[in-house]
Amino acid sequence: MSNIKLLKIIPMRIAKVFFYVSLVIYIVLCSSLAIAKVPIPSLKLDIDLKKDQILKASISASKNSNGDVSNPKQFTLRWTLYRNEGLVVLVRYDNYPYQFILYKQYMTNVWKLNLLDTQGAYREISQPYLSIKFVGIDYPFNDENTIAHLRISGYGNIEFSQE
């Protein structure tokens, strides 16, 4: 009789231990996610551009708020083509050209530009950067009236002055 009682009690104790261990792991994971640092944009700019319309700006950036701000660098942005749900975007920053395609789908709708190290050789969390997100498009099949909606977000210590 005692063996039967033990067989009933042991699985219940294992289940309780498993429950409490799972609960502790869940609490630790949730608290670490709550403490995790999420980058907050210091600049948000929604722009609407027609085909081949140019956005010009000058950008100054520094690694931290106490550091020296870099000399203003020229920034231009325009889009040239919308085909197969992809927007071809041309950017020129510090006289260096970039060309990329943005789509509406997640993970392919944002492009990032490191402002201090444009080649990306020294990537750090504290590096200021811009992100250009493709939000949507109006009249996609009429090149004269097509308007692309983009969102420019800046992270870090950035001074953005539109010309």
Image (cartoon, helix red, strand yellow):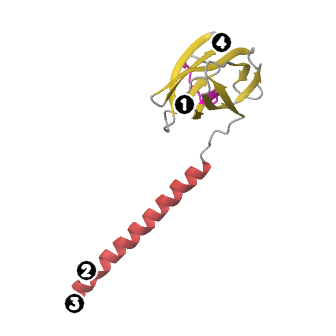
Query: Amino acid type of disc 3?
Result: Met
Asked if the residue under mark 4 is in contact with the one under mark 2, i.e. CB atoms within 8 Å, the reply is no
Earlier residue among tags 2 and 3: 3
Badge 4 amino acid: Asp
Specify the segment rendered in magenta. Answer: 120-132
Q: Secondary structure at mark 2?
A: helix
User: How many other residues sit within 10 Å of disc 3, few (<14), some (14-19) or many (≥20)?
Assistant: few
Q: Which residue is mark 2?
A: 7
Quarter of the image holding residue 67? top right
Residue 128 visible in the shown view: no
Density class for disc 2 (Cα within 10 Å; few <14, some 14-19, many ≥20) is few
Quarter location, residue 8: bottom left
Q: Residue at x 67, y 30 (%)?
A: 48
Q: Residues within 10 Å of mark 4 (few under 14, many from 20)?
A: some
Q: Dot 4: what SS?
A: loop
**Which amino acid type is marked by label 1?**
Pro
Locate the N terminus and report the quarter of the image it occupies.
bottom left
Pick the residue in front: 150 or 153: 150
Q: Position of residue 114 (x, y in %)?
A: 60, 23
Magenta span: helix, strand or loop, mainly?
loop
Q: Identify the mark at residue 91; answer none if there is no mark.
A: none
| Residue at x-position 59% and y-position 46% | 36
Tell me which label, 4 or 1, sits earlier in the chain: 4
Residue position marked by numbered label 4 in the rendering: 94
Circle nearer the N terminus (4, 3): 3
Cβ atoms under marks 3 and 1 closer than 8 Å = no
- Given residues 5 and 55, the one toward you in this image is 55
Q: Secondary structure at mark 1?
A: loop
Which disc number belongs to residue 140? Answer: 1
Q: Work out whether mark 2 precedes mark 1 in sequence or the reverse, and give the earlier one.
A: 2
Q: Position of residue 46 (x, y in %)?
A: 69, 33
Q: Is residue 67 magenta?
A: no
